[in-house]
Amino acid sequence: MSDSLRAELFAVELRTARFEAMVAWYRDVLGLRSLLRVVDDGYALLGAGAARIALVSRPEPGAPSDRVSLAFEVADLAAARGRLAAAGAEIGTRPRSHEGFEELLTRDPDGNRLRLFSWGEGGR
């Protein structure tokens, strides 16, 4: 395949009927950077390291799916858990330890599934 036809993922789009609340949650609770915001169009682009999340305002965004989850690597899982708890987010389980990493499951205000994880010693 030629380089001109090779696709590169630019962003994951989440449609929401609660645009302002979702922008605030992803920015303030998860700590994503605001890259672009067009309030009149109901569009926000947020940076999550090398990845991006686009929040798009829609009156009927559709239901969240359990087929997809957004995975976020965090430096300090305990601190992330504290921020989520302070924001009233439901945390599915206490952090689970696996060989090389710890994780926790939660959902954003619209019910989209999120996985936050941190590499342990010797991980990665």
Image (spheres, helix red, strand yellow):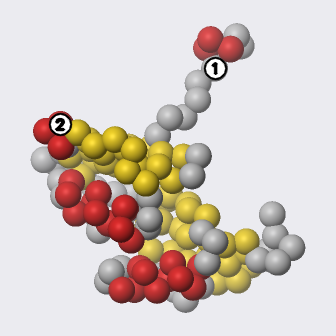
Mark 2 crowdedness (10 Å alpha carbons): few <14, some 14-19, many ≥20: few
Residue 4: x %, y % from top left: 62, 11
Q: Quadrant of the N terminus?
A: top right
Residue 38: x %, y % from top left: 23, 39
Residue at image x 54%, y 68%? 115
Residue 25: x %, y % from top left: 32, 66
Q: Disc 1 designates what residue? A: 6
Left or right, 22 with respect to 114, comes to: left
Q: Disc 2 designates what residue? A: 41
Residue at image x 51%, y 53%? 48
- Which dot, 2 or 1, sits closer to the camera? 2
Disc 1, SS: loop
Residue at image x 86%, y 73%? 122
| Residue type, numbered disc 2 | Asp
Q: Earlier in the sequence, mark 2 or mark 1?
A: 1
Residue 105: x %, y % from top left: 51, 75
Q: Residue 104, can we see it?
A: yes
- Callout 2 touching callout 1 (CB < 8 Å): no
Q: Is residue 68 above or below residue 96?
A: above
Task: Give the Cα distance between marks 2 and 1.
Answer: 29 Å
The dot on residue 120 is none
